[in-house]
Amino acid sequence: MPKNVHLTLACGDYEILRGLIDGTTTPEGVDLTILKNMDSTTRHWRFLRNGEFDIGELSCSSYMMTRDQGMEIDAIPVFPHRRFRHGFVFINTSKGIKSPKDLIGKKIGVKSFQATAILWMKGILEHEYGVPHREIEWFSDLDEDIEFEKPKGLKLTRLPDTTSVEKELVEGRLDAVLHTDLIEPVVNKDPRVARLFTDHHAEEKAFYKKTGMFPIMHVVAIRRHLVKQYPWLPINLYKAFNESKAAGMKRMFNPRVVPLAWYTEYWEEERDLLGNDPWEYGLSEQNHKTLDNMIGYSHEQGLIKRRLSVDEMFLDVSEGKKRGTFRV
């Protein structure tokens, strides 16, 4: 009997990936070894710098840079992670920052300049609130997943490893921080730190109502030599990711799955605003718009030199019109 192709997939431990992780969903022709016990920044580094995984959930911002720089990496239009970002802008409460425009001219820390979460929030601050990214003095915590040529006029300094953007914010050497996650001073309710947007939920809903965009964070990337060796691999992976997501969303309809008192109400509110499938894969009109917006941000912020097109970013996962639904 012919053997399946054995490949490694590094990804987050998400409910919409549960089928792939526990093996109830498998891509036809593939045996997957799943590696899920890494934070995102570590996973991205190990995929891009060390080349450790065949397939990886990868920062969309970094992936766009791989396309711009001609690296041997492709992707399928699968977006395992999305998140609104307004709630991840933090300020030092002694700096008199009351509105987004108060950030102009300030010292702001970021996890890394190219992180997708940071790409989105820099772009949103610039285009929705009138805060040009070139009028900020930026300080990054980590080295970048992919090196890039810093554009003229960009003020970006890497902090020494002996400190962090959280520490610098708390102690007042930074005025604000854009972060990929909730920072410890906020979790611990340190009075020296607060969110810029006190009602970030309302800001995020307003952003969605205006733009229709639910920010994409990650894509699923594949080593190009595997695509050349197994041309059927992208479609089979795409179908398996969709199957896993559908099963995960079906489980989530059960309010007993999540220990929240008003879970059903939260779920209904989200569906009323975002629709039945906010995590939609593929290049639908809305996903195309969201990705094109990201490309614009990336080019504007100097991360990519050429304004890519959405279609060139992803492998074709179509099976032809009206195909794929017939009985065998």
Image (tube, grey):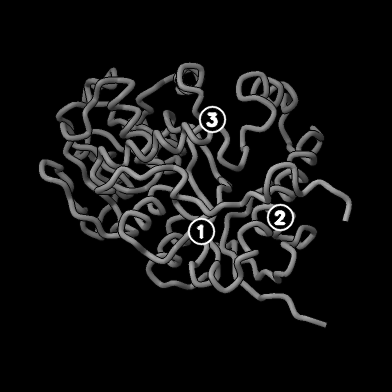
Q: Which mark is residue 286?
A: 3
* Amino acid type shown at disc 1: Ala
Expressed as whole percent of the image width and height from the top left, the position of residue 204 reads 47, 23
> Please, what secondary structure does the residue beneath circle 2 have?
helix
Q: Residue at x 14, y 43 (%)?
A: 155
> Which mark is first along the chain, 3 or 1?
1
Q: Which mark is residue 239?
A: none
Task: Verify CB contact (< 8 Å) between mark 1 and mark 2.
Answer: no
Q: Which residue is mark 1?
A: 221
Q: Which residue is mark 2?
A: 240
Q: Horizontally, is 264 left or right of 120 in the view? A: right
Rounded to the nearest angstrom, the CA distance separating label 1 from label 3 is 21 Å
Expressed as whole percent of the image width and height from the top left, the position of residue 119 reads 35, 40
Expressed as whole percent of the image width and height from the top left, the position of residue 81 reads 55, 44
Placement of the C terminus among the 4 image quadrants: bottom right
Placement of the N terminus among the 4 image quadrants: bottom right
Query: Residue 209 or 261: which is nearer the viewer?
Result: 209
